[in-house]
């Protein structure tokens, strides 16, 4: 089933980004629709992470145009803070705040940034902890949790900000194998709620199950955008075939 | 096949355990309690030798010990009960000067550190200039400049001038400590703070500085102790703190050995108490995770 994307939440046109001489993004154009689940895959160094880090202004592109949630993203924008409130991010290394309890990790954004009253923020945080299946770890510190639990807290932290879009930057790559599924399960459930998700991952099972479209990148370029069925069955480029051969070998 | 690294050294046969909730005591006290009889014996022997040498030396030069006369400089018993004597009042002034200077040094140091970390070229240059001047001029000269030059200009009293000079001098090292602490917080923490919509100021306040504080606490304690010690230098401009009081008493009574030993002991008690308190605080922060 192909999801028919609503009006685009993210709209990128001919993005180019350089790190010194290194051309990290080459003429990247992409629309992500409201409610769409997009998976970005490709060999390491292909610019996937760079691209989604541009989407919430952790990095800036040097040419081209990018609008996210109706806000034009560029280095001098005064609306970057507002943009980031619309777009959540889940990092490979979780990046929970180690000096705060799980509950405080979830409430600090809503209370300090969105000025939600403490009690309301806590109630919401407990609700989302339930949604990621760790309702009873609220008072622990991050280092007392397993990697899988920490990543689920990180997902809940994004949810607490009521983001319109959540970006996932290789969310399972730093996890022990036995914890990958508990995180993917939460992400699948999240997809079922209609959340707009852009996921950089090598978990092709996840892509097959939830993605509306798969974007394949190599060397800073988008080489293919296709439905998962069609991309996995019949990649159109040699690079795509090569990539799938390598990761689906086992 | 790669060789395994050697196991961590185990001291005194008792393996180092990580600090748990049941073990809050500071490191110094634990080491003291774990000392072997040989270590205690050696320590006592060394201490005895020092005391004996100073007594023998003093007696050799015909020094007239008057320890009995010292307590009245510490406290006085009168019709109003027990009142602190001049040395304790001086100690109080030392504590007050040190405390106010250290708080100011923290504020100034934080400002300098943020300026140096900021993207402002002018701010960085200004901070760097201040740091170089304060670091490369002897403290004694700075005391004279603050008292004899800046004092008249701004209408500072001796006390204000001494607090200002101590705060300025120590703000430099404090700023280095703060800068190091901030730099040691992982980049991912900044990004996570940004990704939940925090401004730079909010990220500093709620995420980065609280984490940096744990790293900064031990060196900041060292800096506070160093400030207490360097506060003695303001005796050259006649602020009535502990060292000035000691000097005045010595010039009145000629009891130099007794009074200077007592003054040293008072500084020692103050600094040891401070480092013990900091050790407790550190242990508590560590438990929180």
Image (tube, coloured by chain):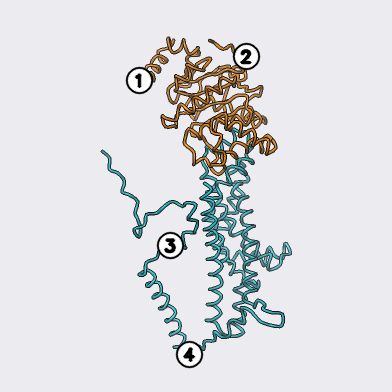
Chain colours: A orange, B cyan
Q: Chain of mark 3?
A: B
Q: Which residue is label 4 attached to?
A: B62
Q: Are marks 2 and 4 in contact (CB under 8 Å)?
A: no
Foreground mark, 1 or 2, reads 1
Cα distance between the residues tagged 1 and 2: 36 Å
Q: Residues within 10 Å of mark 1 (few under 14, many from 20)?
A: few
Residue A102's x, y, as percent? 56, 39
Front-lying residue, B248 or A89: A89
In this rendering, the label closer to the viewer, 2 or 3: 3
**Residue A184 in sight here:** yes
Density class for disc 3 (Cα within 10 Å; few <14, some 14-19, many ≥20) is few
- Left or right of A232? Residue A192 is right
- Residue at the disc numbered 1: A250
**Among the two numbered marks 3 and 4 on one chain, the one whose residue lies closer to the N terminus:** 3
Q: Earlier in the sequence, mark 1 or mark 2?
A: 2
Question: Which label belongs to residue B31?
Answer: 3
Q: Is residue A191 above or below residue B281?
A: above
Residue B239, image quadrant? bottom right
User: What secondary structure is found at the residue carrying circle 4?
Assistant: loop
Q: Position of residue A169 (x, y in %)?
A: 51, 28
Using the image, tell me which numbered label, if any, was put on residue A6.
Answer: 2
Alpha carbon distance from label 2 to label 4: 100 Å
Front of the two marks 4 and 1: 1
Q: Residue at x 42, y 82 (%)?
A: B52
- Pair 3/4: label in front: 3
Q: Residue at x 57, y 52 (%)?
A: B175
Q: Tag 3's secondary structure?
A: helix
**Foreground disc of the pair 2, 4:** 2
Marks 3/4 same chain: yes
């Amino acid at each position: 089933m192909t999801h028919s994307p609503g009006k685009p939440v993210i709209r990128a046109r001919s993005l180019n980004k350089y790190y010194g001489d290194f051309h990290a993004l080459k003429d990247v154009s992409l629309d992500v629709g409201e409610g769409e689940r997009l998976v970005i895959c490709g060999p390491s160094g292909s610019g996937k992470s760079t691209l989604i880090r541009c989407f919430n202004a952790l990095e800036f592109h040097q040419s081209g145009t990018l609008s996210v949630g109706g806000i034009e993203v560029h280095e001098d924008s005064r609306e970057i803070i507002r943009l980031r409130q619309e777009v959540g991010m889940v990092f490979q290394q979780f990046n929970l705040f180690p000096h705060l309890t799980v509950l405080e990790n979830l409430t600090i954004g809503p209370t300090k940034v969105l000025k939600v009253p403490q009690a309301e923020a806590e109630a919401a945080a407990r609700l989302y902890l339930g949604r990621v299946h760790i309702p009873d770890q609220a008072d622990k510190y991050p280092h007392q949790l397993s990697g899988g639990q920490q990543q689920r807290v990180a997902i809940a932290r994004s949810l607490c900000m009521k983001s319109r879009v959540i970006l996932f930057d290789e969310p399972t790559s730093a996890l022990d194998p036995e914890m990958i599924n508990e995180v993917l399960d939460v992400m699948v459930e999240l997809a079922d709620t209609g959340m707009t998700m852009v996921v950089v991952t090598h978990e092709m099972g996840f892509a097959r199950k939830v993605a509306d479209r798969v974007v394949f990148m190599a060397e800073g370029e988008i080489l293919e955008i296709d439905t998962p069925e069609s991309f996995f069955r019949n990649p159109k480029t040699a690079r795509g075939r090569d990539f799938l051969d390598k990761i689906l070998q086992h | 096949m790669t060789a395994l690294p050697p196991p961590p050294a185990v001291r005194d046969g008792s393996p180092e355990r990580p600090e748990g909730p049941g073990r809050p005591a500071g490191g110094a006290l634990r080491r003291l309690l774990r000392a072997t009889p040989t270590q205690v014996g050696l320590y006592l022997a060394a201490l005895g030798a020092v005391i004996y040498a100073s007594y023998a030396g003093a007696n050799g030069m015909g020094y007239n010990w008057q320890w009995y006369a010292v307590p009245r400089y510490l406290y006085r018993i009168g019709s109003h009960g027990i009142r602190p004597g001049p040395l304790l009042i001086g100690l109080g002034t030392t504590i007050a000067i040190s405390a106010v200077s250290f708080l100011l040094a923290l504020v100034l140091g934080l400002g300098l550190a943020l300026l140096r970390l900021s993207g402002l070229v002018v701010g960085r240059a200004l901070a760097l200039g201040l740091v170089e001047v304060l670091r490369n001029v002897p403290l004694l000269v700075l005391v004279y400049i603050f008292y004899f030059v800046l004092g008249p200009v701004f209408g500072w009293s001796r006390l204000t001038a001494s607090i200002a000079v101590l705060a300025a001098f120590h703000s430099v090292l404090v700023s280095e400590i703060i800068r190091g602490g901030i730099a040691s917080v992982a980049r991912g923490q900044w990004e996570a703070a940004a990704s939940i919509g925090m401004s730079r100021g909010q990220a500093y306040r709620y995420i980065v500085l609280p984490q940096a504080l744990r790293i900064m606490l031990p060196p900041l304690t060292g800096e506070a102790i160093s400030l207490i010690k360097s506060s003695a230098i303001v005796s050259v401009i006649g602020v009535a703190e502990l060292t000035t009081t000691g000097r005045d008493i010595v010039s009145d009574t000629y009891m130099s050995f007794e009074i200077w030993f007592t003054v040293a002991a008072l500084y020692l008690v103050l600094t040891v108490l401070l480092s013990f308190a900091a050790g407790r605080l550190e242990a508590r922060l560590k438990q929180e995770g």
